[in-house]
Image (cartoon, rainbow, N blue to C red):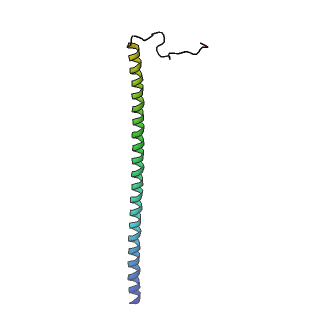
């Protein structure tokens, strides 16, 4: 009888241990999934920021182009030096 009781206790402990280890494994998997999701979110945010920077750069280029067009259309525009500054160094 004593051996049966101890055998049952061993089995119970084994199953409890097994259940605990399964729960731990599940918790670890959940943590890993959360970390992966966070990494993906960070990557997406970085990609969005890069896209916004690209859009800002394109907007800046468009504004420069518009200014050049406006300058060319203005009556004070000098066609011989379209993209040069108004002053030149003396060695030229």
- From this view, report whether residue 43 is shown above or below residue 34: above
Residue 22 percent coordinates (x, y): 39, 67
The total number of labels drawn is: 0
Residue 21 percent coordinates (x, y): 41, 68
Q: Would you identify the image quadrant in which residue 73 lies?
A: top left
Viewer-side residue, 57 vs 30: 57
Residue positioned most to the bottom:
1
At x 47%, y 16%, the residue is 83
- From this view, report whether residue 6 is shown above or below residue 66: below
At x 40%, y 14%, the residue is 72
Residue 80 percent coordinates (x, y): 48, 9
- From this view, report whether residue 34 is shown above or below residue 21: above
Q: Would you identify the image quadrant in which residue 46 lies?
A: top left
At x 39%, y 28%, the residue is 59
Residue positioned most to the right:
91
Pick the quarter of the image with the C terminus: top right
- From this view, report whether residue 28 is shown above or below residue 45: below
Pick the quarter of the image with the N terminus: bottom left
Viewer-side residue, 66 vs 38: 66
At x 41%, y 75%, the residue is 14
């Amino acid at each position: 009888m004593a051996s049966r009781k101890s055998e049952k206790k061993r089995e119970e402990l084994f199953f409890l241990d097994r259940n605990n280890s399964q729960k731990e494994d599940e918790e670890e998997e959940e943590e890993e999934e959360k970390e992966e999701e966070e990494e993906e979110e960070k990557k997406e945010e970085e990609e969005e920021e890069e896209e916004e920077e690209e859009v800002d750069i394109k907007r800046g280029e468009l504004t420069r182009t518009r200014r050049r067009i406006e300058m060319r259309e203005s009556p004070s525009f000098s066609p011989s030096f379209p993209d040069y500054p108004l002053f030149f160094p003396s060695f030229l």
